[in-house]
Amino acid sequence: MDIACNFEDCYNYRIYEIINMEKAVFDKDDIIVDIRNKNILSGKLETNDNPEMYKQRILSILEIKKMFPIIDGAFTYAELDIINGLDEEELHRRILMQKEYQFCVGIRDDIQKKASKIYKKQMDSGKVLKFHCNFKKLETMAESLK
């Protein structure tokens, strides 16, 4: 999957899936946009498919500039397994989270590089840019909770 922005000037990742509008199930609340970089369709089209029918369904946005420290013991792991007996809402939530997770795994190195760059820039300059978390304050709070 491709990244929705240029690595050098972006603090967000658009997490999406590629869908064929002729075959996909979707509803009025889905955010569906045209594919700007048609190269991401390479190897995904079936014979006689119309490339114009492929779109991106936006699943979520990852905003790295709003990262925060994780305190051991202050979180639990999400259960993502699809098992019999789940109600429809829980099933859809788990499927969505699996898609988001797989997307992030695919760009893990880019996420880590970007996070390190943003963090280092803030620590070196001492300036907290607009809409960014104050990493030093968050780290101080996290340390006080240990």
Image (spheres, helix red, strand yellow):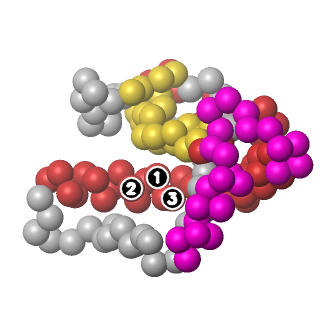
Q: List x then y, in percent, for residue 53.
A: 44, 24
Q: In this view, does 51 lie to the left or right of 127?
A: left
Q: Are marks 2 and 1 in contact (CB under 8 Å)?
A: yes
Q: Is mark 3 on a helix, strand or loop?
A: helix
Q: Which numbered marker is on residue 100?
A: 1
Q: Mark 2 points at which residue?
A: 97
Q: Which amino acid does label 1 sit on?
A: Glu
- Say above or below: 5 vs 109: above
Sequence-earlier tag: 3 or 2:
2
Q: Residue 43 or 6: which is nearer the viewer?
A: 6
Disc 3 + disc 1, Cβ < 8 Å: yes
Residue located farthest toward the right when viewing the structure as drawn: 124
Is residue 61 positioned above or below 53 on the image? below
Does 123 sit above or below residue 59?
below
The range drawn in magenta is: 123-146
**Could you tell me the amino acid type at mark 2?**
Met
Nearer to us: label 3 or label 2? 2
Q: Does the magenta stretch include residue 144?
A: yes
Q: In which quarter of the image is the C terminus?
A: bottom right
- The CA span between labels 2 and 1 is 5 Å
The amino acid at mark 3 is Gln
The residue pinned by badge 3 equals 102
Q: In the image, 65: left or right of 118?
A: left
